[in-house]
Image: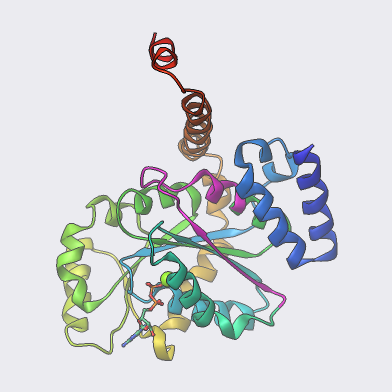
């Protein structure tokens, strides 16, 4: 049974702290996301603080994440990154880019980075993201970071996976902020104006502060400016433990169920469609 395989793989990876085993387990999950939730290990109690980072492409999310990880590691916190790339011909490039940007952590056993495509699940987060995040949590990372591109539905759905959502924008994104779904600012706990080395950054921070009435972090991910402050905020949010209670909110569980059900239905539908070979098959299916 595939789920027995996954169970063994996960358990042994956790016991041995085997990152390669964990990577194989994630691939199994990606192949059979519906079957994988039969593995009870994936339904464990909350132990990893999950940070969602969203924003337009090129805002510096991956760079920010790499710098945040350095801060977390300097405090002995382990971290995993799940980078969700929208399915597009440029995905390969984006993944390669992430590898380069997170390269500095390559030899660190306390850091794990995985990129996955969102494979056009109607613009929503794929069911895999939920279950893979659970696998990373079972493995025992202190912090899990989920990077998503802030277009379409994903940035709103990220709040159902993450315990804390950070939106990263850049001084140039004035227009795209208007274009981004208004909801994105309602779901965020943290606002970041990255590339603060660029003109208009101060103005942007002021504008956001007055419209949102929230604290805005101003960062230059490329040289680490503002990152310790951001990391401190996130670490203290982790320590407050409030997120552990929120994990059990029906809204969160239902969102996860919805993503899994949608995936299951999609698979069922595809099976049925594949059987249609003759006009008669079509009319029978639609009856
Ligand atoms: N000028 C400047 N460039 C930055 C900063 N942070 C990131 N970048 C650059 O912006 C580009 C996109 O960064 P990346 O982290 O891949 O963005 P992502 O698509 O949001 O993950 C890269 O070339 C980075 O080196 C910053 O604070 N200032
Ligand atoms: Mg990126």
Q: Quarter for ligand 1?
A: bottom left
**Quick one: quadrant of the N terminus?**
top right
Taking the image as shown, residue 230 lies to the left or right of residue 135, namely left
- Residue 141, horizontal then vertical, whole percent: 67, 64
Inspect this view and state whether residue 29 appears: yes
Seen as rendered, the residue at the extreme top is 287
Of 30 and 228, which appears nearest the observer? Answer: 30
Taking the image as shown, residue 162 lies to the left or right of residue 90, namely right
* Residue 114 sits above or below residue 9 on the image: below
* Residue at left offset 49%, top offset 31%: 270
Q: Which residues are magenta?
A: 109-132
* Residue 61 sits above or below residue 271 on the image: below
- Residue 16, horizontal then vertical, whole percent: 85, 64
Of 222 and 19, which appears nearest the observer? Answer: 19
Q: Is residue 112 magenta?
A: yes
* Residue at left offset 16%, top offset 70%: 174
User: Which of the 4 quarters of the picture holds residue 137?
Assistant: bottom right
- Residue 116, horizontal then vertical, whole percent: 52, 59
Taking the image as shown, residue 5 lies to the left or right of residue 141, namely right
Q: Is residue 134 magenta?
A: no
Inspect this view and state whether residue 47 appears: no
How many numbered discs sit on the rendered protein?
Answer: 0
* Residue at left offset 30%, top offset 57%: 151
């Amino acid at each position: 049974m595939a789920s027995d395989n996954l169970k063994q793989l996960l358990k042994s990876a956790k016991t041995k702290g085997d990152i390669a085993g964990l990577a194989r387990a994630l691939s199994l999950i990606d192949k059979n996301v519906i079957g994988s939730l039969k593995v009870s290990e994936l339904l464990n109690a909350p132990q990893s603080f999950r940070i969602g980072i969203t924003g337009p492409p090129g805002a510096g999310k991956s760079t920010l994440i790499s710098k945040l990880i350095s801060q977390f590691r300097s405090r002995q916190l382990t971290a995993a990154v799940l980078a969700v790339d929208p399915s597009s011909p440029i995905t390969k490039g984006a993944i390669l880019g992430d590898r380069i940007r997170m390269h500095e952590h390559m030899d660190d056993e306390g850091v794990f980075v995985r990129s996955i495509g969102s494979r056009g699940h109607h613009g929503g987060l794929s069911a895999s993201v939920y279950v893979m995040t659970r696998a990373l949590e079972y493995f025992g990372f202190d912090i899990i970071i989920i990077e998503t591109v802030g277009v379409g539905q994903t940035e709103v759905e990220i709040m159902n996976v993450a315990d804390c959502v950070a939106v990263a924008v850049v001084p140039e994104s004035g227009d795209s902020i208007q274009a981004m779904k208004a909801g994105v600012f309602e779901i965020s706990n943290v606002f970041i104006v990255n590339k603060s080395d660029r003109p208009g950054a101060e103005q942007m921070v002021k504008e956001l502060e007055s419209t949102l009435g929230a604290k805005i972090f101003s960062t230059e991910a490329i040289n680490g400016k503002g990152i310790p402050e951001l990391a401190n905020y996130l670490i203290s949010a982790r320590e407050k433990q409030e997120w552990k209670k929120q994990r059990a909110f029906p809204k969160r569980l239902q969102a996860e169920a919805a993503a899994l059900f949608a995936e299951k239905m999609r698979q069922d539908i595809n099976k049925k469609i594949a059987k249609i070979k003759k006009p008669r098959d079509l009319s029978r299916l639609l009856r």
